[in-house]
Image (cartoon, grey):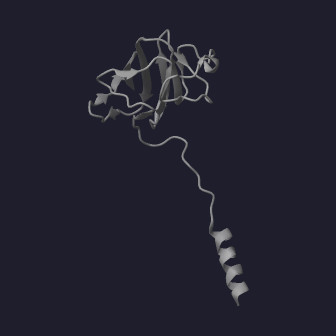
Amino acid sequence: MKNIVIILFLGLFFTSCEKETLTPDPNFSDVTWYASTPLNVSAPIMLPAGRALSIYDLSQGLLTHEWKIVQGSHFLKPGFTNVLAAPYPDLTPFIDTSKGLSTTDATVFIYFPTAGNYTVTLKNTYKDKVTYKGTTPVEAVLVDGVWVFEQVFQITVF
């Protein structure tokens, strides 16, 4: 009797399962991000020279997406160790020279080797209006029928 119950259970388990399908494009639009160091939309963040900043664009319903950095900062390849205290390891072997100053990767690792003021820009486009609902809200702007969200993060490296 016990074997019959087990066989029935397994039969129900394997026949009642259906492969789940995910919609590749969500039917909503939203903008948000996560960073290894909290990013403030209205004030610069402070980082020591030699550190990297990891930023993940978690936005949904994008039409286009781009990260831009300025001269002196570099996109890194994954696989490095970003220690929290000095001495910081040399991250130059991880610089991704193929990216230059912009990339469409959703996740970026940005290296700041020397002191100075830098900017990191997130630019996304959407079919719907989006608003970043942080402490300081930021709204997308309608340009030629497309909603453009652009946020420039100020980074002060010491």
Q: Position of residue 33 (x, y in %)?
A: 42, 34
The residue nearer to you, when weighing 65 against 127, is: 65
Occupied quadrant, residue 124: top left
Q: Determine the residue positioned at 41% across, 14% down.
A: 118
Residue 16 relative to residue 63: left or right: right
Occupied quadrant, residue 117: top left
Can residue 139 be spotted in the picture? yes
Residue 22 relative to residue 29: left or right: right
What quarter of the picture does the C terminus occupy?
Answer: top left
Q: Determine the residue positioned at 59% across, 17% down.
A: 99
102 shown above or below 65: above
The residue nearer to you, when weighing 8 against 37, is: 37
Q: Determine the residue positioned at 40% across, 35% down.
A: 32
Q: Position of residue 69 (x, y in %)?
A: 47, 16
41 shown above or below 8: above
The residue nearer to you, when weighing 42 against 6, is: 42
Occupied quadrant, residue 77: top right
Can residue 152 be spotted in the picture? no
Q: Position of residue 135 (x, y in %)?
A: 26, 33
